[in-house]
Image (cartoon, rainbow, N blue to C red):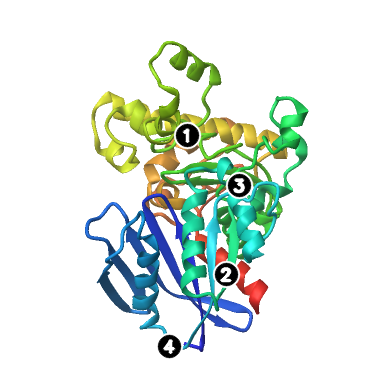
Amino acid sequence: MTDDVLLTFNAGSSTLKIGIFELKPGLARNVGRGKIDFDQDPLTLRYSVGPDRYEKAIGGDNDAHFVSVVSETLEHMLAHLPGRLRAVAHRVVHGGMTFRDATLLNGAEIGRIEELVPLAPLHQPQALRVIRSIETLRPDVRQIASFDTAFHSSQADLVRRLAIPRRLHDDGVRRYGFHGLSYKYIASRLRQIDPAAAKGRVIACHLGSGASLCAMENGISRDTSMGFSALDGIPMATRPGWLDPGALLYLLRAGRLQPERIEDFLYHECGLLGVSGISGDTRVLLDDRRPEAAEAIDLFCLRIAGEIGRLSMTVGGLDALVFTAGIGENQPQIRARVARRLQWLGIEIDDDANERNLTSINAASSNAKLFVIPTDEEQVIADEAMALIM
């Protein structure tokens, strides 16, 4: 390894994922990864550097003593990383109308990220507390933020507009879209795998516990399923996706849902978990023979296929479909069910290639190419950071 090391932090509500990158001229090379699961007790940092694997107990907690979690994480990991920690880069969910590119962080920029907390009250604070912890522990280290919304800033104003008074749109109540770091990686990777397909009309399906779709032309975002918040679009593990606001008004007026519980209800009690009453995990549901499990999976696939139809309209057709993230990369049953609902578009899947999780899974007769491409948000974060510090 060189003397320069970059760490990336991807902070979620229940996990903290860390990427370790060696910086070389023109290249950020991943050499390790780490993760802390805050649902585990005691907290444990599990990480790798090259072929070596490590586990270290962490004495802090996920609340008041979070800075000690970051402190111990840095202490353990840097002990195995010779040389200088050059920079720390972060995934920040919401850039609002302020951030359209990765940004070097100073006090003013961190303050602007804090101003966006109301737009992403469950996600934004997670990244901010890591940023603040690094600022306290290593004020000598440069910090960079990459934003999940930035990739979608290329979308036309018409696509981003909600049918509400113009003053609210101008104040920021508009469709933003998320998972942008994942889609940026997919656009780049597809250019390497199939340059011709990458130049066309591509819909990427980021299917994980959080899920969305993005329509691209020549690698540029034109439309996406998520809107103002990460609740919108297709059903997810515990989030409902598209939901008529009239249903919420009914639940509130009927006294079946208290206003202070709305956020928790929408983020943690709906989606596949709500429909099935069993689990939000598609792996569990696919193995469960109860009709409620089957219905949840069928609804998931129906909505994905329907959104592909809508997004195809935005870009005027479909040349390639990409499946990515945990479900998209690893569950051929879901991919096959979605593809079957798209036969009216001339989409045909190669069952054998699909079962084997090959990169290209379309049949020769298919009107559109089908790909399975693992995503790597940490690599995008590292690349964007390196472009600002090297």
Q: Amino acid type of disc 4?
A: Pro
Q: Please tell me how crowded label 4 is: few (under 14), some (14-19), or many (20+) other residues with Cα within 10 Å.
A: few
- Residue on which disc 4 sits: 82
Q: CA gap, disc 3 to disc 2?
A: 18 Å
User: Disc 4 or 3, which lies upstream in sequence?
Assistant: 4
User: Disc 4 or 2, which lies upstream in sequence?
Assistant: 4
Q: CA gap, disc 1 to disc 4?
A: 51 Å
Q: Amino acid type of disc 3?
A: Leu
- Residue 191 visible in the snapshot: no
Give the number of the disc on residue 340.
1
Up/down of 337 relative to 196, above or below: above
User: Disc 1 or 2, which lies upstream in sequence?
Assistant: 2
- Give yes or no for contact between labels 1 and 2 (Cβ–Cβ under 8 Å): no
At x 46%, y 12%, the residue is 253
- Residue on which disc 2 sits: 143
Q: CA gap, disc 4 to disc 2?
A: 20 Å
Front: mark 4 or 2: 2
User: Disc 1 or 3, which lies upstream in sequence?
Assistant: 3
Q: Amino acid type of disc 2?
A: Gln
User: Disc 1 or 4, which lies upstream in sequence?
Assistant: 4
Mark 2, secondary structure of its residue:
strand
- Residue on which disc 3 sits: 116
- Residue 304 visible in the snapshot: yes
Apparent side of residue 221 relative to residue 245 in the rendered image (left or right): right
Up/down of 76 relative to 152, above or below: below
Front: mark 1 or 3: 3
Front: mark 1 or 4: 4
